[in-house]
Image (tube, rainbow, N blue to C red):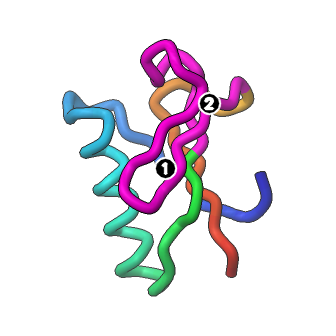
Amino acid sequence: MKQGILWFDDSNLDFYEKINQAVEYIQKKYHKAPRCCFVHPSMLSSQLESEHGKIKVQADSSVLPNHFWLEMIF
């Protein structure tokens, strides 16, 4: 993990909808899209990584549950 934005979401939204909201906010604010999203392993169902649109979603035990670390290049 390098530079990025830490996003917290404990709402009842779908997992990928939470990522969509974070990405939309970041794109609107910084005019750049994150390239990778790190989440706690318990948030991914039995796999260690996934793809969501153009964003790679990867498990990382250093990220707390309900947090999303969106890696950015500034």
Q: Position of residue 1 (x, y in %)?
A: 77, 51
Q: Quadrant of the C terminus?
A: bottom right
Residue sitting farthest toward the right: 2
Residue sitting farthest toward the left: 13
Q: Is residue 42 above or below residue 60?
A: above
Give the quadrant of residue 15.
top left
Viewer-proximal residue among 37 and 12: 37
Which residue is disc 1 drawn over? 7
Q: Secondary structure at mark 1?
A: strand
Which residue is disc 2 drawn over? 59
Could you tell whether 23 is left or right of 74 in the image? Answer: left
Q: Is residue 72 above or below residue 6?
A: below
Query: Tag 2: residue type?
Result: Ala
Q: Secondary structure at mark 2?
A: strand
Q: Position of residue 44 (x, y in %)?
A: 47, 23
Viewer-proximal residue among 24 and 48: 48
Query: Tag 1: residue type?
Result: Trp
Please state the extent of the stretch shown in magenta in the rendering. Answer: 38-61
